[in-house]
Amino acid sequence: MAALGWLTPRRRSATARSVLAGEASAEAARKSVPEEPEFPVLGDDKAAAFFDLDNTVMQGAALFHFGRGLYKRKFFETRELVRFAWQQAWFRLAGVEDPEHMQEARDSALSIVKGHRVSELQSIGEEIYDEYMADRIWPGTRALAQAHLDAGQKVWLVTAAPVEIAQVIARRLGLTGALGTVAESVDGVYTGKLVGEPLHGPAKAEAVRALALAEGLDLSRCAAYSDSHNDIPMLSLVGHPYAINPDSKLRKHARKLEWRLRDYRTGRKAAKVGIPAAAGVGAVAGGTAAAIALHRRRR
């Protein structure tokens, strides 16, 4: 058997030379990977960041959460709440905006606020943020926004949500401000019409372009963040586009152009096809059922 000893692997302790060789190899490998430049750049006052709101900064759609808050304050009936909840559930399940649902939601919101004072809705917006939105902010996206603030840069929300709600959220998060859809008002009272059109898709890109011009920003040094392929025009404007919790179309586009991706959702399906965790949908359904039951008890 001794003759077969050469077949048996021998344990050898690492010599000083082998340790040195291993360390040198690891260092060479590390140096071969190009380091990412520091971003955001500290003190770059020609740069800023633009964040989409729905499903980028916050889980779900701000307009739907706003609708829930208005229902609680008896601005409208149960049947409208059910429609709001269904649209919200669709948005969370599909991970994309349904244009028909979004149009219905905007029309409903405009009819609901018609005749109310702007100051009243602003005050209610503060309460609704605490009730339905504060716990739905994505910590990861919030950290990205804070990095820009810490670098001395301005940070704006850019959203199709009513500008009054967007401004509340921006202020609560310590951001610079917000661009949002503007509802027409006369003498401080809503007329039930929009000024122009919703700030959506290409309109967001135009708003960012106009703000950058007014602020003297260099868009090639700016960053933009969104979850939706509808915001590709806005993302394409800047030098640092990020796909956050992206829908399937944006994910594909981002990978093709080598844009950076971040996904803060949980669950295997979320990572694969952009579907939020089921718990969120359950909360919407449960909230709807509870609201209907409460309404029946009131009757």
Image: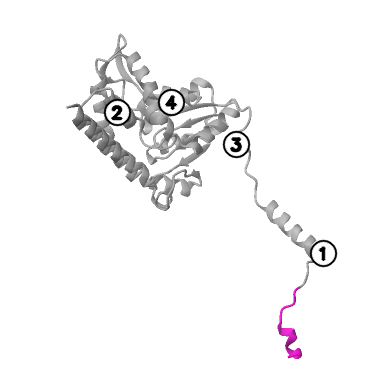
Task: Where is residue 183? Give x, y as percent.
Answer: 31, 20
**Residue drawn at (33%, 15%), measured in percent from left and top?**
120
Q: Which residue is mark 4?
A: 169
Looking at the rendered image, the disc whose residue lies closer to the viewer, 3 or 4, is: 4
The label on residue 39 is: 3
Establish if 1 lies above or below 125. Answer: below
Q: Secondary structure at mark 4?
A: helix
Q: Secondary structure at mark 3?
A: loop
Viewer can see residue 50: yes
Viewer can see residue 96: no
Looking at marks 1 and 2 on the same chain, the residue that comes earlier in the sequence is marked by 1
Image-based side of 26 in relation to 172, left or right: right
The residue type indicated by label 3 comes to Phe
Do tag 1 and tag 2 residues touch (Cβ < 8 Å)?
A: no
Image-based side of 66 in relation to 33, left or right: left
The label on residue 285 is: none
